[in-house]
């Protein structure tokens, strides 16, 4: 089977081939931590998590970067807005880094609540300033950037490909809301480094060859992706020869322009290779059928929904359930329906756990599982058609329920293993059935790993895992209702 992704750069479904065999580099534009990330933001992050999980399921080793924007993201697309971080800080009468710390903490809690895998790197813009300065110097050297009234601008007329990703041809951009600025050569030139005296009151600022200042938003993503996913930066110095094309870059569809367009211009202005191979963008989320807005009260936050009693699994399930390139309507009714769907999986797994009687393997049941595996992979290979894959999962649940009385203990245990193994993709069944109360997650992960080993009759691994669990102070007992974990 061939994995295909829809590439926003070419507007085509393309076979996925990473630069290095078996390895994938992926960059996901992360949050600007001046306020809470809402479920709409999380649709885009969970989409990236789904890509990661599926690539891992296919056997790739993934290196993922999700940045934290804590300086330089302005309140509008032009360069006249206020820094979102500084604005929030002023309002709260706090330092911007205090604001950043507070919202980063909540963001990471929500991330964990939604059972998203941890990326390898979570860099902050404020920790990437030396790289940003180095790349800016390279762009000035190459004739793509210029200094004007203290700021450093990217000259978009020096980069004819500008507009390719978003389909915004330069001549069409005249309609946009960005104001002309006498300091710029072209109306859509964007700031790489702010050190104009107008910004002297900015709290976060750094020394640079152009005076004290701070970076433009787009620069951090060009720099962090190159710094953590390629060998181009060494000790803050940039070597364009060492840059390697990044396999996947994602974001919400609103990131395409100007943000990703500017990232492409910056990186490709400095290196002689494509910046990113596969650009992937998630569609906007509607909430209760409408665009999210404070006045409509439909800007839902993950931790609020959990406080209201919705299960994190249901939130995750609803957010991944629609294809990422289609609009998704997130509603509280939808969350209740998601919880009911998950109950159907839970009930089947509980029933399988409860099977204690040994029987010959049932061929019909085995076929349901093998077809399920094939269909899930076929659907996910097709640009992550998760709705098709989940449809197959529920179909298998329905069919297995019809033949439950023909399934014996060994076969039931192996099916449980198969379900958990498919759940590496979805992340909706984790820790199911098992008594999770007060048992730390790392222990539950070991218990789950042991269940898979047991279902594969890999008794030596299963025993090793039991010992490891014991060494960490917990005991696992196998009961007809599945494993029971206890603190020793
Ligand atoms: Zn970004």
Image: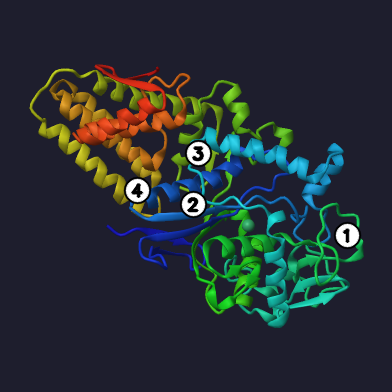
Q: Which badge, 4 or 3, is on the more N-terminal residue?
A: 4
Label 4 within 8 A of ligand 1 by Cβ: no
Q: Please tell me which residue is depicted at 42% across the width and 68% down the height of the picture.
A: 19
Q: CA distance from mark 3 to mark 2?
A: 13 Å
SS class of the residue under badge 2? loop
Q: Please tell me which residue is depicted at 27% across the width and 57% down the height of the picture.
A: 1
Residue 57's disc is 4
Q: Nearer the viewer, mark 1 or mark 2?
A: 1
Q: Please tell me which residue is depicted at 48% across the width and 65% down the height of the picture.
A: 11
Residue 199's disc is 1
- Residue at the spot of label 2: 325
Q: Which badge, 1 or 2, is on the more N-terminal residue?
A: 1
Q: Is residue 426 above or below residue 138?
A: above
Q: Which badge, 2 or 4, is on the more N-terminal residue?
A: 4
Q: Position of residue 43 (x, y in %)?
A: 54, 43
Q: Which badge, 3 or 2, is on the more N-terminal residue?
A: 3
Q: CA distance from mark 1 to mark 2?
A: 39 Å
Label 2 within 8 A of ligand 1 by Cβ: no
Q: CA distance from mark 1 to mark 3?
A: 40 Å
**Residue furthest to the left:** 360
Q: CA distance from mark 1 to mark 4?
A: 48 Å
Residue 319's disc is 3
Q: Position of residue 333 (x, y in %)?
A: 52, 26
Q: Is residue 239 above or below residue 419?
A: below
Q: Is residue 407 above or below residue 44?
A: above
Residue 343's disc is none
Instruction: Give the quadrant of ligand 1.
Output: bottom right
Q: Which badge, 1 or 3, is on the more N-terminal residue?
A: 1
Residue 248 seen in this snapshot = yes
């Amino acid at each position: 089977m061939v994995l295909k992704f829809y590439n926003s750069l070419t507007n085509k479904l393309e076979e996925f081939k990473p630069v290095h065999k078996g390895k994938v580099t992926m960059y996901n534009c992360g949050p600007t931590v001046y306020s809470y990330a809402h479920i709409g933001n999380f649709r885009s992050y969970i989409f990236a998590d789904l890509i990661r999980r599926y690539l891992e399921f296919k056997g790739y080793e993934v290196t993922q970067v999700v940045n934290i924007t804590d300086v330089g993201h302005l309140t509008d697309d032009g360069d006249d807005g206020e820094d979102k971080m500084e604005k929030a800080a002023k309002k709260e009468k706090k330092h911007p880094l205090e604001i950043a710390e507070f919202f980063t903490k909540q963001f990471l809690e929500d991330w964990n609540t939604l059972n998203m895998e941890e990326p390898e790197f979570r860099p902050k813009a404020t920790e990437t300033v030396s790289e940003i300065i180095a790349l800016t110097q390279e762009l000035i050297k190459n004739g793509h950037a210029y200094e004007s009234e203290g700021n450093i601008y990217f000259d978009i007329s020096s980069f004819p490909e500008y507009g390719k990703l978003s389909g915004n041809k330069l001549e069409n951009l005249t309609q946009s809301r960005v104001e002309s600025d006498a300091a710029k050569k072209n109306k859509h030139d964007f700031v790489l480094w702010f050190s104009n005296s107008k910004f002297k009151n900015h709290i976060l600022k750094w020394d640079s060859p152009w005076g004290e200042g701070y970076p433009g938003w787009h620069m951090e993503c060009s720099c962090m992706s190159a710094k953590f996913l390629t060998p181009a930066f060494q000790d803050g110095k940039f070597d364009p020869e060492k840059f390697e094309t990044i396999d996947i870059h994602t974001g919400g569809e609103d990131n395409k322009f100007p943000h990703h367009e500017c990232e492409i211009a910056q990186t490709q202005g400095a290196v002689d290779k494509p910046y990113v191979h596969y650009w992937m963008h998630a569609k906007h989320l509607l909430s209760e059928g409408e665009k999210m807005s404070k006045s409509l009260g439909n800007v839902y936050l993950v931790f609020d929904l959990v406080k209201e009693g919705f299960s994190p699994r249901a939130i995750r399930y609803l957010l991944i359930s629609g294809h990422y390139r289609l609009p998704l309507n997130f509603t509280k009714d939808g969350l209740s329906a998601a919880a009911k769907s998950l109950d159907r999986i839970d009930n089947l797994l509980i029933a399988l756990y409860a099977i204690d009687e040994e029987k010959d393997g049932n061929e019909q049941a085995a076929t349901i599982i093998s077809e399920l595996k094939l269909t899930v992979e076929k659907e996910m290979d097709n640009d992550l058609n998760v709705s098709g894959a989940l449809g197959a999962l529920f179909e298998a649940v329905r069919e297995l329920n019809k033949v439950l009385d023909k399934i014996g203990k060994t076969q039931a245990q192996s099916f449980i293993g198969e379900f958990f193994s498919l759940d590496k993709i979805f992340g909706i069944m984790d820790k199911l059935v098992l008594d999770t109360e007060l048992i730390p997650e790392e222990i539950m992960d070991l218990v789950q790993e042991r269940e898979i080993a047991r279902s594969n009759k890999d008794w030596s691994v299963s025993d090793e895992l039991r010992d490891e669990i014991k060494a960490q102070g917990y005991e696992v007992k196998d009961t007809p209702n599945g494993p029971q974990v206890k603190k020793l």
